[in-house]
Image (spheres, rainbow, N blue to C red):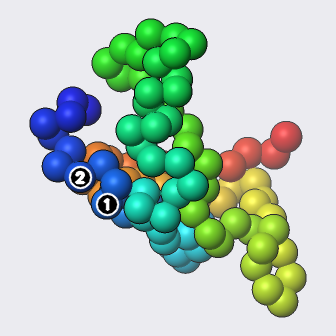
Amino acid sequence: MTADEVPDPQNLRLWLEVDGRRYQDGSTRTMIFSVAHIISYLSRFMSLQPGDVISTGTPPGVGMGQRPQPVYLRAGQTMRLGIDGLGEQQQTTVQA
């Protein structure tokens, strides 16, 4: 994506579902570091190219934090995640 394709990178919704249940639903506006800061920081150490993926961490709702007890992925479960306006991806877990 180019800067002109994302009007406000600090207002993108991030989400994750496991087998259709939404566990995480957040926004880039609540991240500790802004998108611009992350890109600027990485650019000091490496050249970013079209198609590069930058991992930023995760919004609230991770499995370890689920109550009353943690939730762990099992083989065969389907994870779907996305960023509104940018796209989504899906993976099926396998036994390690």
| Residue placed under numbered mark 2 in the picture | 8
> Residue drawn 37% across and 14% down?
49
Position of the N terminus by quadrant: top left
Residue 60 location (% of width, % of height) = 62, 69
| Residue placed under numbered mark 1 in the picture | 11
Image quadrant in which you'd find residue 76: bottom right
Res 15 visible:
no
Res 29 visible:
yes
User: Label 1's element?
Assistant: loop
Horizontal side, residue 90 vs residue 1: left or right: right
In the rendered image of this protein, does residue 23 appear above or below residue 16?
A: below
In the rendered image of this protein, does residue 3 appear above or below residue 78?
A: above
In the rendered image of this protein, does residue 6 appear above or below residue 30?
A: above
Horizontal side, residue 44 vs residue 2: left or right: right
> Residue drawn 52% across and 74% down?
22
In the rendered image of this protein, does residue 96 appear above or below residue 7?
A: above
> Residue drawn 83% across and 89% down?
68
> Type of residue at label 2?
Asp
Residue 70 location (% of width, % of height) = 83, 75
Local packing at callout 1 (Cα closer than 10 Å; few below 14, some 14-19, many 20+) is: some
> Type of residue at label 1?
Asn
Q: Are marks 2 and 1 in contact (CB under 8 Å)?
A: yes
Horizontal side, residue 76 vs residue 35: left or right: right
Which residue is outermost to the left? 4
User: Label 2's element?
Assistant: loop
